[in-house]
Every structure is written in C-alpha cells, then in structure tokens.
Amino acid sequence: MSVKIKHKITGYEVVKPEELEAVKAAAAEKENDKLAEVVHLHERVERPEILAGTTYKIRSPLFEHSLYVTINDIILNQDTEHESQRPFEIFINSKNMEHFQWAVALTRLMSAVFRKGGDVTFIVEELKAVFDPRGGYYKTGGIYMPSVVAEIGLVVEDHMKRIGLILPDDPAERESLRKKKQALKDSHKTSAEQTPKASAEATETESADSYPRNAELCHKCHTKAMMVLDGCQTCLSCGYSKCG
C-alpha cells in the first residue's frame, strides 16, 4: 500500500515490529493526557453598589476596646433554584489603633479568599487554630478562646452557619435550618402575589406567633428569640443559654 506524503519530511525514526505496540500505546497515552487537561472556568462577579452585612462584637480581655467584625454577603443566582448567599468581604474595626496593621492585612486576605469563590469554609479552621503565646481567655458563656484571631474564626463560622454555607453538626439543626431557608424563599415568592388584605392578615398572624421584636438571633437554633432572662441571654425557642 502506498501513502502519499503531503508535507516536507524534517525527520524520521525507524520502528522495529516488536516496538510498534509500545509506540502506539505511548501515542494513545499522550493523546489521553491532552483530553484530560482540566479547563478552569470562572465567573467574574462585579461588586454590587449595595451589599447586606452583619456586624459582630468581640469583647476580649486582651484588648482595651471591643472589635467589630462586619461581614458583607452577596446573593448569587437570585430568584432561581440555585440561589445561594456567600460572604463577599469582611471588615474589622476598633478604637484600638495598636493592631490596625494586622487587622487590615487579615481582612484584605480574607476578602480576597471570599471573592475567589469555591469552598471557602477552610478559612474557619485556619483561624481557629491560631494560638496566642501570652495565653487565651474565656469569653461569655465559658467558651475558651486560644486567641483573638480564633474568636474571629468562630464569628466567621457562626456567620457561615447562619447563611447555610456550613451545616450544623446536629441533624435536627440542619433540618431546622433547611426548613427555615425554604420558608423564607417561599415567603419572598408569595409576598408579591398577596393582596393588601391577605398581607395584613398574614402580618397579624405572624405577630401573634412571633417572639418579642427586640429579641436577638440564637446561634444554636437560628431563631430570633434570644432574650435577657435573670441577667443571662436565653433562647425562648430552644432554651439555649449563654450562661450554660
């Protein structure tokens, strides 16, 4: 059988019959490597003009003044079945200017990780693993904190649990969180369809069954039912108390 060569020969190699199978296998493996190359896809998300955020207060005996940690979230795929809420940026503010440099550096790095996308929950364990050589302290409720940075990690973890990025360890808590998020989505969908009369009836019913307006969010059951009882914050929904 004759084969017409259409291109200029720049080099050649003689392959023995017993080496032919090995050459074919090597060529096939090289072709598979090309097909298996990973193509990294990414989506550039521009920062909206307005982002909703939550501010947490950290009171440490190591600092004269409190730290205020603000985490702003972005909602991806809004009004679709793939809607998700993710942290987009973080800020740390305090009257104490002594730690200004490391606070700014930490927030910039964390914000860059949040905007990078993917699984960002790993940052919680990294922060919680930081120990202060001077020793840790006990925060309100008797929880030991090895450092201020570790408490910042705990704040980020609580926030990620609130928005559903980290699921609680307890299956009952996970199911409760799932139902609350689903109910919230359903309420957003039906609010636009309700008549003024129906809206008023719904508001009246909700007010009768809800907890006091000045109640705070419980970090355990994720219900806005934390009230000060006998000098200690206690959840009216699940009974959790910060005083143990």
Image (tube, rainbow, N blue to C red):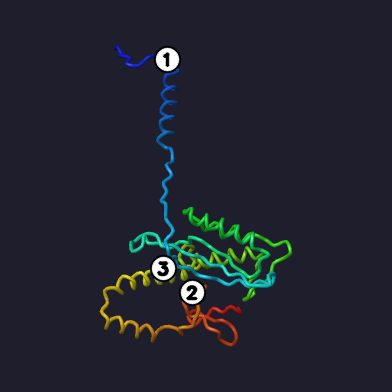
Residue topped by disc 3: 178
Q: Residues within 10 Å of mark 2 (few under 14, many from 20)?
A: many
Is residue 28 depicted above or below 228 in this figure? above
Quick one: quadrant of the C terminus? bottom right
Apparent side of residue 60 relative to residue 25 in the rendered image (left or right): right
Q: Nearer the viewer, residue 187 or 237?
A: 187
Q: Residue at x 47, y 73 (%)?
A: 222
Residue 150 figure quarter = bottom right
Secondary structure type for disc 3: helix
Is residue 136 depicted above or below 37 in this figure? below
Coordinates of residue 172 in the picture (x, y in percent): 46, 70
Q: Residues within 10 Å of mark 1 (few under 14, many from 20)?
A: few
Q: Are discs 1 and 2 less than 8 Å apart at CB?
A: no
Q: Given the current orientation, which residue lies at the most extreme top position? A: 2
Spatial distance from mark 3 to mark 1, Cα to Cα? 66 Å
Apparent side of residue 176 relative to residue 97 in the rendered image (left or right): left
Secondary structure type for disc 1: loop
Spatial distance from mark 1 to mark 2, Cα to Cα? 73 Å
Kindly identify the amino acid type of the residue bearing the numbered disc 2. Cys
Coordinates of residue 196 in the picture (x, y in percent): 27, 81
Q: Nearer the viewer, residue 241 or 70?
A: 70
Kindly identify the amino acid type of the residue bearing the numbered disc 3. Arg
Apparent side of residue 208 relative to residue 149 in the rendered image (left or right): left
In front: label 3 or label 1: 1
Q: Which of disc 2 and disc 3 is earlier in sequence? A: 3
Q: Which mark is residue 221?
A: 2
Quick one: quadrant of the N terminus? top left
Is residue 19 depicted above or below 135 in this figure? above
Q: Which of disc 1 and disc 3 is earlier in sequence? A: 1
Residue topped by disc 1: 10
